[in-house]
Amino acid sequence: MAASLPLSQSAGASVLIVEPDSSSAAELARIFTSAGFKVATARAGAEALRSLRDDPPGRPNPRRTPHA
């Protein structure tokens, strides 16, 4: 069973959603964003790995935009 943070502790935490279906990714992003998470998405594993390498969590990035 995965550990979960209380919503009060999730504010500002980041999550990377890896999902090839754009409508599913958008719905997941909406759910996580509404819970206070910063969300990034990738369509496949290779894209997700590039994202993590090029833009690691915790490093400020003015190009990163929240999903709504």
Image (cartoon, grey):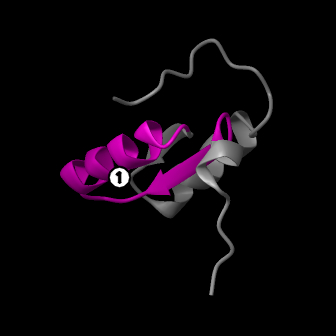
Q: Is residue 33 left or right of residue 27?
A: right
Q: Quadrant of residue 2?
A: bottom right
Q: Is residue 41 left or right of residue 28?
A: right
Q: Residue furthest bottom?
A: 1
Residue lying at 45% horizontally and 38% vertically, measured from the top left: 33
What element does badge 1 sit on? helix
Q: In front here: 19 or 3?
A: 3
Q: Is residue 59 above or below residue 3?
A: above
Q: Tell me the crowding category of disc 1: few under 14, some 14 to 19, or many 20 or more residues within 10 angstroms, Cα based.
A: some
Count how many numbered circles sit on residues in the image.
Answer: 1
Q: Is 28 colored magenta in this rendering? A: yes
Q: Residue furthest right?
A: 59
Q: Which residue is mark 1?
A: 28
Find residue 45 and report its horizontal and vertical position in percent.
52, 62
**Which residues are drawn in magenta?**
11-36
Q: Quadrant of residue 3?
A: bottom right
Find residue 14 and report its horizontal and vertical position in percent.
64, 43
State which quarter of the image contains the N terminus. bottom right
Q: Residue furthest left?
A: 23
Q: Is residue 60 left or right of residue 16?
A: right
State which quarter of the image contains the C terminus. top left
Residue lying at 35% horizontally and 52% vertically, measured from the top left: 28
Q: Is residue 28 above or below residue 45?
A: above
Q: Is 2 colored magenta in this rendering? A: no
Q: In front here: 13 or 19?
A: 13
Residue lying at 75% horizontally and 20% vertically, measured from the top left: 60
Q: Amino acid at mark 1?
A: Leu
Q: Residue furthest top?
A: 62
Find residue 46 and report its horizontal and vertical position in percent.
54, 57
